[in-house]
C-alpha cells in the first residue's frame, strides 16, 4: 500500500529566504525573515555535527577545510540542506 501525505502551506524555511554564503573558512547563513531562532548545524561527511548555532537573521561559523552539509531547521520542523566545500 502507498499512502500519500500532503502538507498545506509553504514550509517556513522557504518563507525565511534562507541563503548560505562562504568566504574562505567562514560560512554565513542568512535568514532575513527569521523571527525566532533557526537551528543551523554543520555536519562533516562522517555525519558528525561539527558546529551548531542559532540564527536570528544571520549567523557565521568557521569551519576547517572539508565537505559539509549545512542543515537549517525552522520552528515548524521544516528543514533545508546545502552542501558546501571549504578549500
Image: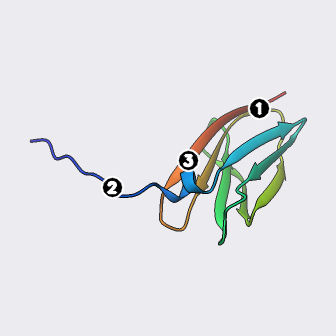
The spot of residue 81 in percent (x, y) is 58, 43
Question: Mark 1 against mark 2, which lies toward the viewer?
Answer: 2
Instruction: Look at 54% across and 68% down and name the residue there.
Output: 75
Q: Is residue 31 above or below residue 54?
A: above
Count residues near mark 3 (Cα–Cα under 10 Å), then give few for <14, some for 14-19, many for 20+: some
Is disc 3 placed on a helix, strand or loop?
Answer: strand
Q: Is residue 19 above or below residue 73?
A: above
Instruction: Look at 75% across and 52% down and name the residue there.
Output: 30
* Closer to the camera in the image, 42 or 55: 55
Question: Mark 3 against mark 2, which lies toward the viewer?
Answer: 2
Where the N terminus falls, by quadrant? top left
Labels 3 and 1 touching (C-beta < 8 A): no
Instruction: Look at 67% across and 56% down and name the residue there.
Output: 40
Residue underneath mark 2: 7
Q: Which mark is residue 66?
A: 1
Q: Earlier in the sequence, mark 3 or mark 1?
A: 1
Q: Tell me the quarter of the picture where residue 33 sits.
A: bottom right
The spot of residue 85 in percent (x, y) is 75, 30
Q: Which mark is residue 80?
A: 3
The spot of residue 26 in percent (x, y) is 87, 44
Labels 3 and 2 touching (C-beta < 8 A): no
Amino acid at each position: 500500500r502507498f499512502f500519500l501525505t500532503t502538507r498545506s502551506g509553504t514550509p517556513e524555511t522557504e518563507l525565511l529566504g534562507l541563503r548560505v554564503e562562504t568566504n574562505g573558512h567562514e560560512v554565513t547563513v542568512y535568514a532575513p525573515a527569521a523571527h525566532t531562532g533557526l537551528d543551523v548545524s554543520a555536519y562533516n561527511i562522517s555525519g558528525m555535527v561539527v558546529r551548531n548555532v542559532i540564527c536570528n537573521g544571520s549567523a557565521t561559523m568557521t569551519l576547517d577545510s572539508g565537505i559539509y552539509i549545512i542543515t537549517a531547521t525552522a520552528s515548524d520542523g521544516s528543514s533545508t540542506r546545502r552542501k558546501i566545500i571549504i578549500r
